[in-house]
Amino acid sequence: MLYRENGQFKTTYKADQQIFPIRQDRIAMLAVLAIAFLLPLVVSNYLLATILIPVVILSLAALGTNILIGYCGQISLGSGAFMAVGAYGAYNVLMRLPGTPLIVALLVGGVCAALFGVLFGLPSLRVRGLYLAVTTLAAQFFADWMFYRVKWLTMHSPSISVTAPDVSVLGIPLNTYTSKYLFCLTVLILFALAAKNLVRGAIGREWMAIRDMDVAAEIIGIRPVYAKLSAFAVSSFMVGIAGALWAFFYLGAWEPDAFNLNMSLQLLFMIIIGGLGSILGNFIGAAFMVVLPIALRLILPEISDLFNLQLSTAIAAHIEHMIFGALIVWFLIVEPHGLARLWSTAKHKLRVWPFPH
């Protein structure tokens, strides 16, 4: 009986178009944000480094990928390449122009990724489905080749590996796990709000119309060229900034293989598990992909000791992958619309209880 809109009257268009029109949702969201910002006070650096920072950054990358695949329906296997372009773009700005603010470097990296995404998004004007997935896969292979072969992009590093420079924001050095987490969380919240407003606006409706039936969308006046390329640009921009954050604040030192095809597939799994076309699903999918492998590594030794099994490191790794894959398949069978759909269904039942319809 607590989750009701009764008595929550809207007297203006602004109030009626709020992102969270129900008061209980607004209170819950403020509570979640407060907890997220206060977590560094109660958790260890280990949890910040291994769970919280990766979840926050991968949530941003999944958000960008979901805009392209979940909202616009353009299947992409090149998200890892867009992350790499954003990371190397921001890195080159900071190294070649000393004193450049970090935020400016991140934006430049995002713009480089957006241009790269639009370039490889051009085939989407002619092909779709599996054929489009293959063209974006070509972007992944091209990025791998480019960052291995073009020495200028890696500052002529003899080992191809590069190290992130020391960064700061407004004179505050970001050299602790707490400062890194808070900065990444702030960036994620800003982009999540921007994405939510985009998908609720005219451009978001155009993306979803193209996703549902592009021929019908074109008949009613939607420009496929603008809709598809704008989705590639916005998606690649967000993924590129996520790539720069991943390189600077999580990896510290990296090489092109850090953004290989495996990263693209992980982002695809995140949005499928969390929920295509859902902002909340990005956070759930990222948390699932980060926390589950760690939990399996902790549980498997306990199970082997309980049953007196002698498992080698290689066998334990294979079992971990098997369990992980089986859980993904199970979730897709039980809830093909993603875990975010479970939360949406629960909210609907609460709103109409005890008179379900």
Image: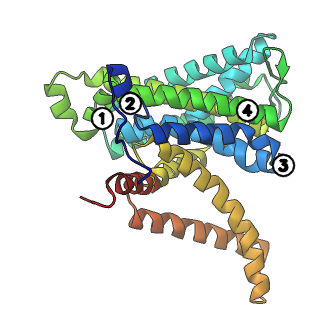
Q: How many marks?
A: 4
Picture residue at 37% right of the left edge, 55% below the top? 345
Q: Indicate the quadrant where residue 352 lies.
A: bottom left
326 or 10, which is in the foreground?
Answer: 10
Under circle 2, the secondary element is helix
Q: Which mark is residue 199?
A: 2
Under circle 1, the secondary element is helix
Colouring rule applied to residues = rainbow
Residue type, label 3: Ser
Picture residue at 58% right of the left edge, 48% below the top? 286
Query: Cα distance, mark 2 to mark 4?
Result: 26 Å
Disc 3 target residue: 44
Residue furthest to the left in view is: 219
Q: Which mark is residue 208?
A: 1
Q: Are marks 2 and 3 in contact (CB under 8 Å)?
A: no
Disc 4 target residue: 182
Q: Are marks 4 and 3 in contact (CB under 8 Å)?
A: no
121 or 241, which is in the foreground?
Answer: 241
Under circle 3, the secondary element is loop
